[in-house]
Image (cartoon, helix red, strand yellow):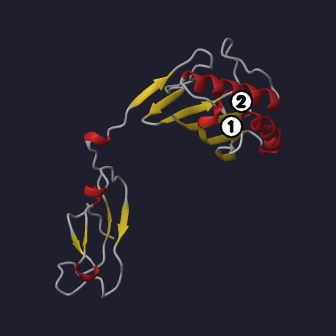
Amino acid sequence: MAWCAARLSMPAAHGAQIRPLRARYPLAAGLCCVSFVGSRLWSSSTSHSKPFACVASASFSTSAAVSKEPVQTEKAPAALGPYSQAIKANNLLFVSGVLGLVPETGKFFSDSIEGQTEQVLKNMGEILKASGTDYSAVVKTTIMLADLKDFKAVNEIYSKYFSSPAPARSTYQVAALPMNARIEIECIAAL
């Protein structure tokens, strides 16, 4: 397999030209393209003797620059590492994983899955509020559980915070969570 940058134009079937990825999509990073295998697509007059595979090189334009703004509130637990509670990027809000910690003490509200889930969602609500939005703007959540057997209990509490249509969601059992938490939830919201 050969690796190459996207070409300016390539002959295609019936004499049509394929416009370069960079011209159509200013941010074409990591796009993979594979040519079709077949004699019909590659005429004998082309300089290409074999089908190829390529990865388009990254092309960042200043007009497609991402605007990033950190969100910080003292009404939710501080980040436990080098990350923001949330980041506003253009028209989206990315909320980091939230634990069931009480902001004032830095300790878990409860050892129970119900207590931690309730506190996680309250903390998330404070971050959403500090960002100028609320639960209704959330489009995707990811739930990480220390034990997938807690799925049903989490769903009962979760459903009180997200009305229909509920956000898209993924739920995983993980090997461990920070501070031996039982649950962590992150989300993406539209602004």
User: In terms of depth relative to the viewer, which is nearer, 21 or 179?
Assistant: 21
Return the x and y of residue 180 as percentages of the image width and height.
Answer: 71, 30
Residue drawn 36% across the image and 66% down it: 33
Residue at image mark 2: 180
Which kind of residue does numbered mark 2 sit on? Asn
> Which quarter of the figure is the N terminus placed in?
bottom left
Outermost residue, top side: 104
Residue drawn 62% across the image and 20% down it: 77
Number of other residues with Cα within 10 Å of mark 1, as a class: few under 14, some 14 to 19, many 20 or more: some
Q: Quadrant of residue 116?
A: top right
Q: Please say if the residues under marks 1 and 2 sit with CB atoms less than 8 Å apart.
A: yes
Which kind of residue does numbered mark 1 sit on? Ala
Residue at image mark 1: 176
Where 84 sits versus 144, above or below? above
Distance (Cα) linking label 1 and label 2: 7 Å
User: In terms of depth relative to the viewer, which is nearer, 162 or 95?
Assistant: 162
Asked whether, in this view, residue 109 is left or right of residue 179, the answer is right
The local secondary structure at tag 1 comes to loop
Q: Quadrant of residue 13?
A: bottom left
Badge number at residue 129: none
Return the x and y of residue 182 as percentages of the image width and height.
Answer: 74, 33
Return the x and y of residue 164 as percentages of the image width and height.
Answer: 71, 43
Asked whether, in this view, residue 143 is left or right of residue 70, the answer is right
Where 105 sits versus 43, above or below? above
Number of other residues with Cα within 10 Å of mark 2, as a class: few under 14, some 14 to 19, many 20 or more: few
Residue drawn 25% across the image and 65% down it: 19
Return the x and y of residue 73 as percentages of the image width and height.
Answer: 56, 17
Residue drawn 29% across the image and 50% down it: 26
User: In terms of depth relative to the viewer, which is nearer, 83 or 185?
Assistant: 185
The local secondary structure at tag 2 comes to helix
